[in-house]
Amino acid sequence: MIEKDFVPVIPFVSQEAGNVRAEAPSNIALIKYWGKYPGQIPANPSISFTLKNCTSATSIAYDKKNIKDSGISFEFLFEGQSKPEFEPKLRTFFERIIKYLPFLEDYHLKISSSNSFPHSSGIASSASAMAAMAACLMEMERRHNPDISPEYIALKSSFLARLGSGSACRSIAGGLVVWGKHDAVAGSSDLYGIPFPDAIDRVFHDFQDTILLVHRGQKQISSTLGHKLMDGHPFATQRFEQANRHLQEIKGILANGDLDRFIALVELEALTLHAMMMSSSPYFMLMKPNTLAIIERIWQYRRETQVPLCFTLDAGANVHVLYPNTYREKVLQFIKNELVAYCENGQYICDQVGTGVEIS
Ligand code: DP6
């Protein structure tokens, strides 16, 4: 599909009013998206596990406007409270998507959103929030045009979510999702995420992600600004090439379930992401001393026990511990005994691979 396939061709007859609701999960990237071009086009392809328990639930009550004017009219509540600081991002999102959902100009939207995970936990909520929002808007489109197919709805939801936040486009489908064109992944696109189409060993079907909340405060740098740091970064070209090579490489790993190679690749990706931030101008250090302490304990435990667990990081200090479901009890015991001490207020979240967005 290309961009113009997402512009509706038939005029919609607007309805009086209605209500839509969607719940979308967060995702954790194995190969990271870091760097983008105008129009939310990623500088390199990425792949992530869709999660299950860290979700955003969004509902939109839409009401026909009395006077039709151009532009989108909306109000936004987060966990029952108005959040003026979120409005500029939402406004930009609506400006980007109005061309693809022109019927929105007929309505006033009352949007309410909430997260299943603690507010300001440092977990990226823009992915789940924007995916839930995009899914709600596509449910509105479906009600105006019931003939659109589930496949089209899935791709366009991801396309719209991307225009809100790049990584959000990987939170519509479940399992493993690829975003960004790569010759080795059939159907991959810079415009939306697709379920990884090739063989996946069963060990990855129910992979676990325990998120250790090392630092719950405000991030030092938003990821939107972070991506900008890759413009003119001295290592940008090599990084983008490396990510492309890694995607080629992970194909084989996912097919044959080679956990040693999986671990090496996922940890390298996490550290490269942080290395990019540490070597940009200006530079940032988003890991905290406890992030490093956890990484060292994970390495030591892996050496001593041969349990195939590894870590990955987002653009922040929290640590995602990834491991196969068969080691769940053992790893959780290790986390409780040895890693919880490094978490702020002892907090962590148990998550695992999930099935993607749900409309209710
Ligand atoms: C480090 O998707 O939050 O989590 O497109 O500007 O909203 P915007 O950025 P965002 O970037 C996420 C970056 C990352 C890596 C990843 O999820 O691939």
Image (spheres, rainbow, N blue to C red):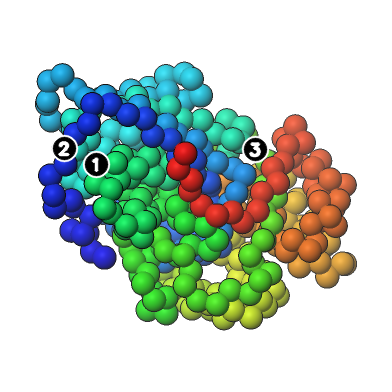
Q: Is residue 11 visible?
A: yes
- Circles 1 and 2 in contact, beta carbons < 8 Å: yes
Disc 3 residue type?
Answer: His
Mark 1 vs 2, N-terminal side: 2
Task: Choose between 4 and 239: the one closer to the eye.
Answer: 4
Toward which corner of the image does residue 256 lie, by quadrant? Answer: bottom right
Residue 205 x, y percent position in the rendering: 63, 65
Residue 111 x, y percent position in the rendering: 38, 28
Q: Residue at x 37, y 40 (%)?
A: 136
Q: Which residue is mark 3?
A: 215
Q: Which mark is residue 144?
A: 1
Alpha carbon separation for disc pair 1 and 2? 7 Å
Disc 2 residue type?
Answer: Val
Question: What secondary structure is found at the residue carrying circle 2?
Answer: loop
**Viewer-nearest of discs 1 and 3:** 1
Q: Taking 194 as reference, is 345 above or below it?
A: above
Disc 1 residue type?
Answer: His
Q: Which residue is mark 2?
A: 13
Q: Is residue 223 visible?
A: no
Q: Residue at x 86, y 51 (%)?
A: 333
* Image side of residue 109 versus residue 79, left or right: left
Residue 63 x, y percent position in the rendering: 26, 24
